Image: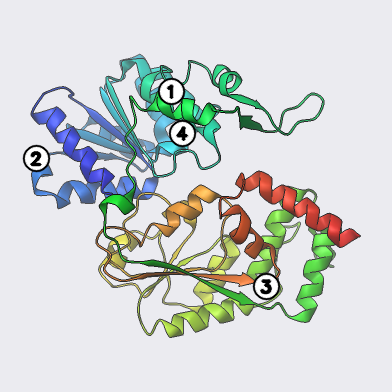
Amino acid sequence: MGKTAITLTAVERLLRDSFDVTRVLVIAPLKPAAETWPAEIQKWEHLQGLTYSLVLGSEKDRTAALEKEADIYIINRENVVWLVNFYKKKWPFDMVVIDELSSFKSPKAQRFRALKRVRPMIKRIVGLTGTPAPNGLLDLWAQLYLIDGGEALGKTVTGYREKWFVPDKRNATTIFSWKPKQGAEKEIYDRLKSCCISMDSAEYLKLPERLFIRHEVELPAEVKEQYKQLERDMLLPFADGDIDAGSAGILVNKLLQLCGGCVYDENGGVKEFHSVKLDKLEQLIEEANGRPVLIFYAYRHERERIMAKFPEAVDIKEDGAVTRWNAGEIPILLAHPASAGHGLNLQHGGHIAIWYNWTHNLELYQQANKRLHRPGQKETVLIHHIGIKGGLDMQVLDNVLAEKANAQEYLIQALRAKIKEATT
């Protein structure tokens, strides 16, 4: 939807036309902070007069960047706490833009608490996000508090929760989850109307089609038995280090790792079980006939195996990787969804994405799938998923990522049912 360019246009007018603000801070994920925001400023003719300073890197580099004269200062969200402590009561930014506002959804997070301290000193604040409530309406309170200081949803998260939610899953003393009261969703949305604009890209943009393609592969018989044993006993014994899943949450990760081909043992070593996904990945790359391919992975050992198999692959974290990809210079680009899930424009470098393994975080999954399907894309976007037949990865894809339930809670409950089924 071009929300970066739209926001920068508003900033330019507030700085140059109405003189409403004097110093603007942009808070963004690291990659968009370093690449997307500067590129957008340089891209548009009407923004050429804007100056910016990148508050990134070492503390010495960040301090030097803050001392430069500029209209806009761009910092990654991991350094928000440092920035607030650096200025203390002498906060100089009268306008703040938070790119991917949903990364401030937790009221317990240090970055939220830090920004909350200086919120009274900020004249204008803008939050940008494509996934405001990926895990439910409770996620909205902290984000909206930063926007309006609690006017819409209340001054405290406790008050917000008590007004519009009731306990859902609980034991005698502990509440594990909350669900909205009847009619709460409409009431909450009505209160957001004064400070939120929501735009559906389908209503405004004519983008190429996006196709999701499934590829299910079979585990070798021996590995299939090991998978069932891990699912049943939560343990796979090995002489040099057991694979032990002490809880349902750990077991989720172990089974997803096994679906990918390798599992971390108790000593941090990597046990290799199969290469069926890797073989299928090779086939899909061959079928791409030289067209660039974006590959998403979930675990570090998957990245290492893919790079060993395809030496021409480049990790998106490498300096200049995004620019080179969009210039058509990279045949295979590797990305973890947490590194490429927000704000990056990758649509100029290709139209084929392959999920080698995937996250059960709905927000990261949705955002990653948007990297190629953006304005400027001219080809049908193909998003391949390589899954294990009967594996937990396909269950995640079919249920958790289909938005049928709260992702983490659904996954744990489904896994407990599978354990019960396996043990009986």
The quadrant in which residue 135 appears is top right
Residue type highlighted by circle 2: Gly
Question: From what the image shows, is residue 251 above or below residue 166?
Answer: below
Q: Which residue lies furthest to the front in this view?
A: 183
User: Measuring 32% from the left and 45% from the top, which residue is drawn there?
Assistant: 33
Indicate the secondary structure of the residue bearing disc 4: helix
Whole-number angstrom distance, CA of label 1 to CA of label 4: 10 Å
From the viewer's perspective, tell me whether residue 296 is left or right of residue 424: left
* Viewer can see residue 245: no
The residue to which callout 1 is attached is 145
User: Measuring 25% from the left and 68% from the top, which residue is drawn there?
Assistant: 327
The residue to which callout 3 is attached is 389
From the viewer's perspective, tell me whether residue 52 is left or right of residue 311: left
In this rendering, the label closer to the viewer, 1 or 4: 1
Residue type highlighted by circle 4: Phe
Residue 104, label in figure? 4
Residue 91 placement (x, y as % from top left): 31, 19
Q: Residues within 10 Å of mark 2 (few under 14, many from 20)?
A: few
Residue 229 placement (x, y as % from top left): 84, 66
Of callouts 4 and 3, which one flags the residue occurring earlier in the amino acid sequence? 4
Of callouts 2 and 3, which one flags the residue occurring earlier in the amino acid sequence? 2
Residue type highlighted by circle 3: Lys
Indicate the secondary structure of the residue bearing disc 2: loop
Q: How is the image coloured?
A: rainbow
Q: Are marks 3 and 1 in contact (CB under 8 Å)?
A: no
Residue type highlighted by circle 1: Tyr
Indicate the secondary structure of the residue bearing disc 1: helix
The residue to which callout 2 is attached is 49
